[in-house]
Amino acid sequence: MREFVFEVRYEAAADELMDLFIETPEARSTTFLCSMGNAQLWRLDRIMGPSSAVEEATALLTGSEYNQLSVSGRACGGRHYSDILEDGPHRSLVYSYFEDLVHCDSIPTITNRYINGALLFEIIRQENTERWRILMEDDKKVGMLYDTLGGVLRDGLSFHFDRVSDASGPLLALFDSVSIRPEQRRVLELAAERGYYETPRQTTLDELATELDWPRSTVSYRLRKAEAALVDGFMSVN
């Protein structure tokens, strides 16, 4: 398996969704996408961050007005279906399905013009950057794909090559098999967002408890349970 990794960087006002991440640096999204030919694809978007940014991003991804796919000045035709699989104050999970894509200048459909077979895509969005990772069996025409992607981007978007190499590492921690209860996940994510795991720590259990409006003992217990689940999950695959 080979991987093609690159970034697309956005100027302010070039894209509604990316503007949310530019304006809210602590927000981010991770996406798993499968392209099935040049006219059909599905994807899962996990959005995480402050509730207002999560709510606005979810509305864009499930609405009909936002141009979700095209990176050129031409909108994609076709049909779009979406469903919210998880909806919380600081995270959501959105499923989207696209079919009958016509004259679509999206990165997946452009990739399918050069690379045969089903393709897997990982996209991480934060601040002004989309980081793409495309997994493929054959990278013979990646050079042509590289040239096309760099030339098709509309004003306000820029292409930045990283590497073409053997695939390494897991595909999206979002879909790892670690099972964490929602209340444990909530405190774990808040702790990470507030810098609890940084050195030196940027927040305390008392501050987390105040923000969550939970007893300190509850925060400590749920955080320990979440950490234990992550360790167990890590040990089971290493």
Image (cartoon, grey):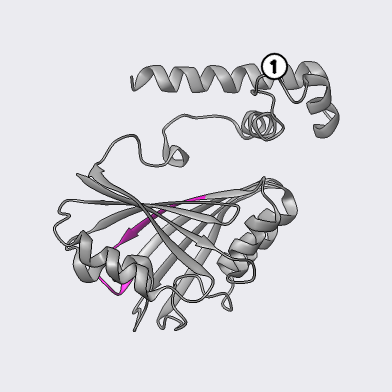
Quadrant in which the N terminus appears: top left
Residue closest to the eye, 26 or 178: 26
Residue drawn at point x = 73 percent, y = 50 percent: 51
Image position of 101 (left or right of 75): left
- The verdict on residue 9 being magenta is no
Residue closest to the eye, 40 or 156: 156
Would you say residue 36 is visible in this rendering?
no
Would you say residue 30 is visible in this rendering?
yes
Q: Which residue is mark 1?
A: 221
Residue drawn at point x = 30 percent, y = 75 percent: 39
Residue drawn at point x = 17 percent, y = 51 percent: 137
Rate crowding at label 1 as few (under 14), some (14 to 19) or many (20 or more) other CA atoms within 10 Å: few
- The verdict on residue 39 being magenta is yes
Quadrant in which the C terminus appears: top left
Q: Which residues are magenta?
A: 30-40
Residue closest to the eye, 155 or 67: 155
Relative to 194, residue 10 above or below: below
Image position of 233 (left or right of 211): left
Tell me where residue 12 sits by quadrant: bottom right
Tell me where residue 115 sits by quadrant: bottom left
Residue closest to the eye, 86 or 207: 207
Q: Amino acid at mark 1?
A: Tyr
Is most of the magenta stretch helix, strand or loop? strand
Disc 1 on helix, strand or loop?
Answer: helix
Q: Residue 95, percent across and down?
A: 48, 59
Q: Residue 187, percent across and down?
A: 69, 30
Q: How many marks?
A: 1
Q: Residue 141, percent across and down?
A: 17, 62
Relative to 5, residue 41 above or below: below
